Amino acid sequence: MKYVVDTCSLLEGAILRNYEKEYFPVHWENFDLKVDQGIIVSTSLVYKELKYQDDEFYQWAKNRKDIFKPPCGEVQKVLTDLFNTFPKWAKHNYNQKFTWADPELIAFAKVYNLVLVTQEKQPTIPLEEERYKIPTICKNYGVGCIDILELIKREKLHIHL
């Protein structure tokens, strides 16, 4: 495994998104190949988010349910540490969202030394901890973080494999 992918990056293939599947079929075919090879995974809470976000991608997720990993004991320990390290971020977001995969993704990436793929951007000006985004937490927690375009470049998803 090399990458753990956030909901927003998976949804980039949806209609009216930057990498809509209809116009980037090679990218998404290669993405699926990397998923099948175990190079790209995600987490159980991303699966749950997809269930409430987009019918097309939920169907895709249902067909690949084994890539959505549950948090093992070590991930649970890192989650506890993450919440202790960034308590305002955790409290603010946990209380605001029905399903919130961000901490699980970060903890999973940390435990398995994976690069986290998200479309969230690190702001150019510092924000209060409550408003931190995934890249800010990753940077401060020692976890690599890229967006889907960088994944496409690194894994050459734009080339017929």
Image (cartoon, grey):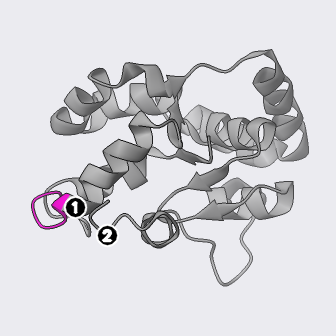
Left or right placement of residue 108 versus residue 160 in this view:
right
The magenta-colored residue range is 21-25
- Residue 45 or 36: which is nearer the viewer? 36
- Residue 57 or 67: which is nearer the viewer? 67
Residue drawn at 86 percent across, 24 percent down? 77
Q: Secondary structure at mark 2?
A: loop
Is tag 1's residue or tag 2's residue first in the polypeptide sequence? Answer: 1
Q: In this view of the protein, can residue 133 be seen by the observer? A: no
**Residue 36 magenta-drawn?**
no
Residue drawn at 16 percent across, 37 percent down? 56
- Residue that extends furthest to the bottom in the rendered view of this protein: 124
Left or right placement of residue 52 versus residue 35 in this view:
left
82 above or below 68? Answer: below
Indicate which disc residue 26 carries: 1
**Residue picked out by circle 2:** 158
C-alpha span from label 1 to label 2: 6 Å
Q: Position of residue 136 (x, y in %)?
A: 72, 64
Three-letter residue code for mark 2: His
- Residue that extends furthest to the top in the rendered view of this protein: 73
Q: Position of residue 89 (x, y in %)?
A: 73, 48
Q: Secondary structure at mark 1?
A: helix
Q: Quick check: marks 1 and 2 in contact, CB under 8 Å?
A: yes
17 above or below 104? Answer: below
Three-letter residue code for mark 1: Val
Quadrant containing the C terminus in the rendered view: bottom left
